[in-house]
Every structure is written in C-alpha cells, then in structure tokens.
C-alpha cells in the first residue's frame, strides 16, 4: 500500500426498491347509514365491505397509493386519479387513501389539485385519508392544509365525518 496514495473505501450502492403503483378501486352503491347511527370511533377498524355511498349522494371512487410518491411515480399517480374521474358519473366523489405512502414530495400537488378541480366542477369533492405529519407538512408547505384536512379512514372521508385533528 502506497502511503502517498489516498485509501479508497468501497461504498455500497443502494438497492432499488420497486414502488407499487397506485390503483383505482371503483366503489359500488350501498344504502347510507341511518342518520341516527352514531359515528364510528376513530380507532375502529374500517368496514371490510368495499362499498361506499358518498355523503350527499353519488358513488365514491377510492384511489389507494402505496410506497413513494415522487417525480418518478407521479405519472402513475396521475393516471390513477384520472381513471377514477373517467369512471365516475355525475357528481364526482373521490377519496384518496395515502395511509400506505412512505414518502411524498411536491410533485403530487399538481395532479391532486387538477383532480380536485375536476371533482368540484361536477359538484363533487376529493378528500384525502392520511396518517402522520409528513403529508400534513407537505400540504401546509403548499398552502393547501384547508383544502385537504386529514381524514382517519376511508369511511370517515366518504361519509364526511369530522376530519382528524392535526396538531400544529
């Protein structure tokens, strides 16, 4: 070993982890819960039945995303949102479930805002289900906290139960 030559240390290369693609899951119509039924507790498990009827009438499309949402995966994310919009009829109601997203950057905001505008233009809405503070911080940084309050479950978002409180 030459003492005048700097030593080199091998650096392990990161192993690429495939990011699952977002999926669109159409939700069939079901009867709404009676008005006298109590709201489910925030910690209650979600209803295993996939059917959802949106508050105010109409079918609720659920878009679920998993893994990392960044500039490389945002085209698939955008396609999933557009697919939910195409499948909807009349008033568009979309619940975006981001609970299994491990990372998201600002590249998701444009397709999210476009989908929201499309839903509102039809008299409907787009609501977001997420956990933790990373997405809350992303929405705050984008000035969108009021547009995307955090819902704890898909059921809460579809039925318009009060959004979960995010400490500031």
Image: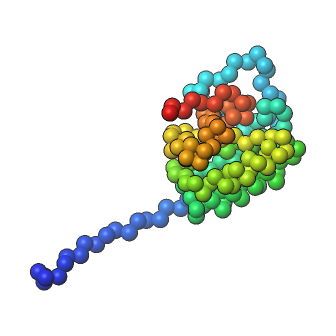
Q: Residue at x 55, y 54 (%)?
A: 105
Relative to 141, residue 162 above or below: above
Q: Quadrant of the N terminus?
A: bottom left
Q: Nearer the viewer, residue 139 or 31?
A: 139
| Left or right: 69 in relation to 92 | left
The percent coordinates of residue 34 (x first, y second) are 79, 20
Q: Residue at x 82, y 31 (%)?
A: 56
| Left or right: 107 in relation to 113 | left
The percent coordinates of residue 31 (x first, y second) are 82, 29
Residue 26 visible at all: no
Q: Residue at x 57, y 29 (%)?
A: 165
Q: Nearer the viewer, residue 109 or 154?
A: 109
Q: Nearer the viewer, residue 31 or 55?
A: 55
> In terms of image quadrants, where is residue 60?
top right
> In terms of image quadrants, where is residue 83?
bottom right
Q: Residue at x 19, y 78 (%)?
A: 6
The percent coordinates of residue 52 (x first, y second) are 76, 36
- The colour scheme of the drawn protein is rainbow
The percent coordinates of residue 163 (x first, y second) are 63, 30
Q: Residue furthest front?
A: 143
């Amino acid at each position: 070993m030459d003492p005048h030559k700097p030593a080199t240390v091998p650096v392990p290369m990161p192993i690429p982890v495939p990011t699952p693609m977002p999926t669109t899951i159409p939700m069939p119509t079901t009867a709404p819960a009676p008005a006298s039924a109590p709201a489910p507790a925030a910690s209650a498990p979600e209803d295993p039945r996939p059917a959802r009827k949106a508050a105010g009438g109409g079918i609720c499309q659920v878009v679920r995303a998993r893994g990392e949402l960044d500039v490389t995966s945002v085209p698939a994310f955008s396609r999933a949102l557009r697919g939910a919009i195409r499948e909807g009829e009349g008033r568009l109601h979309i619940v975006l479930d981001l609970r299994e997203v491990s990372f998201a950057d600002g590249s998701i905001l444009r397709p999210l805002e476009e989908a929201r505008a499309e839903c509102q233009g039809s008299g409907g809405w787009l609501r977001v289900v997420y956990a933790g503070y990373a997405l809350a911080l992303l929405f705050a940084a984008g000035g969108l906290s009021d547009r995307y309050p955090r819902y704890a479950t898909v059921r809460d978002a579809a039925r318009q139960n009060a959004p979960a409180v995010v400490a500031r």
